[in-house]
Amino acid sequence: MPILVYGDIGNGKTIFADQIGYQYAQKNYRVFKFQREPDNVGDVLAYLQGLDEPALLIFDDVMRFPKLPTAILEMRKSNLVILATVRTSFRDTSASAVKSRLANVTSIEIDLDSPLREEAVRIVEYLTSNGLLGKYSDFSNSEKLQFVERTCGGQLRDIVLSLFETGVLHARVEELLVNIQKLDKSARDLIIFSAVLTEAGYQDLSEIWLLSQLLDYSGAFEELRASLLKNELGSLVRIDEGDLSIRSPALAEFILKRVFNLETILDVVKRGLTSVDNHFASEDDLVKMAKGLLKFSVYGRIIKSNRENAIVEKFYDDCRLFSFAVDDPLFWVQRSICTMNANEFDISFRFIETAYGLAARRMNWDTYQIDNHKARVLLTQSRETGVSADGSRERDAISLLQSVLTRKNDDLYHPLSVMRIYAEIVDKYLHTLTAAQKPPLKQSIETAIRSISKFKHPGRFRNLVELRNRLAGAVKELSI
């Protein structure tokens, strides 16, 4: 029985075949990897007919070999093992053609698109030990595993796309992405909305019927699937069982960054949100999704320049009257994040006050997120424009953070990430601080250190020791 290895582009078919070849060589097999099919296959067959040693014959991308694999299998020599690779898209759409390449016999199939948990663990170990995780290197082991399994969908291709900015794989995937432009506009809009849903963590809502309702798509499901497969997009955009989904958040981000401009993306999202507001305002899961699509973090990762902040702010302005936005304090926090990102601090603070006002109208509504965000805006302003003359801005920030930590000491990621800005401020302005600025800034940082030293379970929070050391180093610098 031949061995058929299939996987999406970039998922390691060639490397896997080479590794199998190495394993067979260790067991004293002759290993042959065919580069092309000769015009006359008879010479190859004659050589193999006289070969008494066991041999592994590798056909990487079996669709490039119309005659030779079949001819070898028809020889029925028990000492010859054929290993062939093929893209998943060919196996899914042209199964009969793939089977005919292997003499229509039953194959042992190996799927590289669905790694087991133990394989994901080994991938994490490999990336960690070889220093390839970059900005993800300080993740805990469980977070690294989640990055591989969820963010990248366990796809080697998407891990590479996420960890590196350029490379041969990027060029190969971008060649396929060009085909998205060959689809009609309504189909492209479906892909945009599905990609944004995946990026925001709502991939389970990528049902064709729902996307069609939200974006007023009138095309037929079968026509859409045929168009995607015709343009070789089946390995990137999955369409089956009534769903249209991007295979992983990492790939969704790559598609949004490389194919569509931000204005087009936000226009499609706004149309979908308008439909939710007009027709699905009573559906809790869709309203939750709509609020999720209003988070700045969904679009912050695909912003390419500071000029595009204005495009996102216009998007928020256009969405402000939606029923699920107008009275939601957290919608105004998202607007504030957007303007903070553009260093428009006065406007950012105005949106924060709006959020506080709306929160006050709600019974027992905890302002934890607003407080934490206001502290971030205060310290970001200090980092970008300079320390306040009397240190009052920095004192206000630590006061807010202390309040947050007192109320929710089990959720520390956000307040701790804000505290880190104190060290960044000292790094930037240490040699220009006045005698009036140093003492209050030093006092605020010392208060931050005392706050984190009171945590009862410091081992639960990664980088806590590193943060304490950073802040202690900043205090030392200010003491000199």
Image (cartoon, helix red, strand yellow):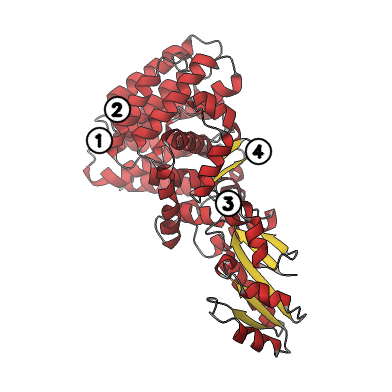
Vertical order, 453 against 390 (above or below)? below
Q: Earlier in the sequence, mark 3 or mark 2?
A: 3
3D distance between C-alphas at marks 3 and 4: 25 Å
**Residue on which disc 2 sits:** 345
Residue type indicated by callout 3: Val
Callout 3–callout 4 Cβ contact below 8 Å: no
Front position among marks 2 and 4: 4
Q: Earlier in the sequence, mark 1 or mark 4?
A: 4
Q: Secondary structure at mark 3?
A: helix
Residue type indicated by callout 2: Phe
- For residue 313, which quarter of the picture? top left
**Residue on which disc 3 sits:** 148
Q: Secondary structure at mark 1?
A: helix
Front position among marks 1 and 4: 4
Front position among marks 3 and 4: 4
Q: Earlier in the sequence, mark 2 or mark 4?
A: 4
Q: Secondary structure at mark 2?
A: helix
